[in-house]
Image (cartoon, rainbow, N blue to C red):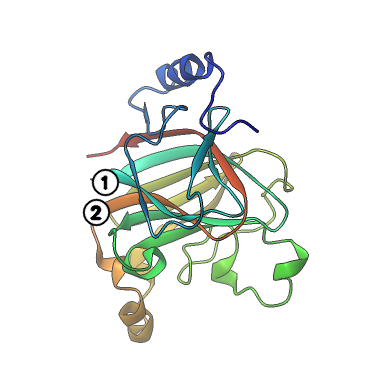
Amino acid sequence: MRRLAVWCALPLVTLLAAAQEPGFRSLFDGQTLGGWKLVGGKGPGYVVEDGKLVCPADGGGNLYTDREYSDFILRFEFLMEPGGNNGVGIRSPLAGDAAYRGLEIQILDDQHERYKGWLKPEQHHGSVYGLIPARTGYLKPAGQWNDEEILLDGRRIRITLNGVIILDTSLDIVQEPQVLKKHPGLARASGHIGFLGHGTRVEFRNIRLRELR
């Protein structure tokens, strides 16, 4: 694969897709990492390959938007290698573990052999990591593109995977004192959006966002 190279038509495709979704704007130009900041990077971190944002198997770390966001709809496509593991940080600070200091929406090939028998319900794909489980069974096999939407509106969170709503609830359903203490990010009203790499190859494309406020 060619790193830091794209087909010239891809930005036009991205612009056309955004034009068909009023109010949405692209967070990734398909050519550079402009608008993003790498925190705790490993190896090459994240790279651009053929118009896609890629977390290589020998890379990773947290790649955050420069800007902070509060209420929004985030749409993107992703493709994992077998056993792929990543996450989407929302309302996250730049420092600390996004799954606890902010919120993490799990991206995981949760049916892979390496995860069988030990995953908790709130660790499956689409779950608010460590907090709220998502419905399972709607993730396409590794090597195929998936389409996902994250809606965050005040205390409401909704996750849609390949056209199916797999989670739709209020963050306020988490009431256990010990969990609230462990996850102070639940109380945050805004923060960065990020991709949270965990040492496996995951590709992203068509990353776009509409702010609700």
Can you name the residue that lies furthest to the right here? 113
Amino acid type, mark 2: Ser
Q: Around disc 2, counting alpha carbons within 10 Å, would you say few (fewer than 14), some (14 to 19), or many (20 or more)?
A: some
The x and y percentages for residue 60 are: 50, 55
Which residue is the site of mark 2? 190
Quarter of the image that includes the C terminus = top left
Residue that appears at 72% across and 48% down: 142
Query: Mark 1 falls on what kind of element?
Result: strand
Is label 1 in contact with label 2 (beta carbons under 8 Å)?
yes
Residue that appears at 58% across and 42% down: 203
Residue that appears at 56% across and 68% down: 123
The x and y percentages for residue 152 are: 35, 49
**Residue 210 — which label?**
none
Quarter of the image that includes the N terminus = top right
Q: Quadrant of residue 117?
A: bottom right
Front residue of this view, candidates 38 and 188: 38
The correct choice, above or below, for 18 with respect to 175 in the image is above
Front residue of this view, candidates 58 and 175: 58
Q: Around disc 1, counting alpha carbons within 10 Å, would you say few (fewer than 14), some (14 to 19), or many (20 or more)?
A: many
The x and y percentages for residue 100 are: 37, 70
Q: Which of marks 1 and 2 is nearer the N terminus?
A: 1
The x and y percentages for residue 83 are: 69, 58
